[in-house]
Amino acid sequence: MDMDRRDAAMLVSSIVLCELVGALGSVFSIAAIPKWYAGLAKPQFLTPPSWVFGPVWTALYLMMGVSLYLLWRNGPRAKGARAATEAFGAQLMLNLLWSFLFFGLRSPLLGLAGIVLLWAAILATIVRSYRVSRAAAAIMVPYLLWVTFAALLNFYVFILN
């Protein structure tokens, strides 16, 4: 199937939007990671090397962008498309909020509250997206799994500090 220019522009726009949110979130984490985060007690069995986070999040934002494109491509007339894109927007903003709460405010407790809301919003996005595009929903599953892992790590950071 050939992608016309409109589809290509929608795909690129979707990916850029998601990566931009990731870049905005990194504003909070870049300064906090080498000083504040590095000094926190973390569970050794659960903490990957710091270099893992950048590539994983970049790939996840790319996948989110593709998922959003698949929802947009179906258009506003597709049954459930509006609810799915609204849920997507909510989870994307909660993603940014978590970076601010955890890294910006340097609060594992607020970060934990934020990531629980984020997890629920991602799940809602997957459920609503499934009604519009099974592929869009499936692409979000690795993101949900990673946020599950991040929530567990956030929980342990809160408990240990």
Image: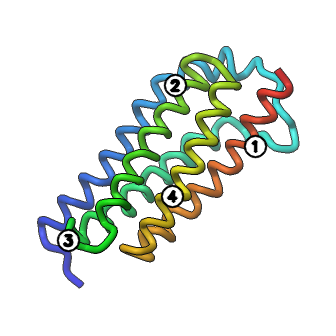
Q: Which of the marked residues, 1 or 2, is nearer the chain's N terminus?
A: 2
Q: Residues within 10 Å of mark 1 (few under 14, many from 20)?
A: some
Circle nearer the N terminus (3, 4)? 3
Q: Under tag 2, what secondary structure? A: helix
Please, what is the three-letter code of the amino acid marked with disc 3?
Arg
Of labels 2 and 4, the one closer to you: 4
Marks 1,4: beta carbons within 8 A: no
Binning the other alpha carbons within 10 Å of mark 3 as few (below 14), some (14 to 19) or many (20 upward) gives: few
Colouring rule applied to residues: rainbow
The kind of secondary structure element at disc 4 is: helix
Q: Secondary structure at mark 3?
A: loop
Mark 2 vs mark 4: which is more N-terminal?
A: 2
Q: Residue 29: percent from the left, percent from the top?
A: 55, 25
User: What crowding class fits label 2: few (fewer than 14 Cα within 10 Å), some (14-19), or many (20 or more)?
Assistant: many
**Disc 2/disc 4 C-alpha distance (Å):** 22 Å
Examine the image and state in which quarter residue 50 appears.
top right
Residue tagged by mark 1? 152
Could you tell me how far apart the alpha carbons at marks 1 and 2 are, in whole angstroms? Answer: 18 Å
Q: Position of residue 9 (x, y in %)?
A: 18, 59
Give the mark nearer the N terminus: 3 vs 2. 3
**Kind of residue sitting beneath label 2:** Phe
Q: Which mark is residue 100?
A: 2
Residue visible at 56% across and 24% down in the picture: 101
Which one is closest to the eye, mark 1 or mark 3?
3
Between the residue at mark 3 and the residue at mark 4, the CA separation in whole angstroms equals: 20 Å
Mark number displayed over residue 77 = 3
Give percent across and percent down for residue 62: 42, 54
Eyeballing the image, is 128 above or below 2? above
Check residue 124 in the rendering and tell me which mark sits there, or answer none.
Answer: 4
Q: Residue furthest left?
A: 5
Query: CA–CA distance between discs 1 and 4?
Result: 19 Å
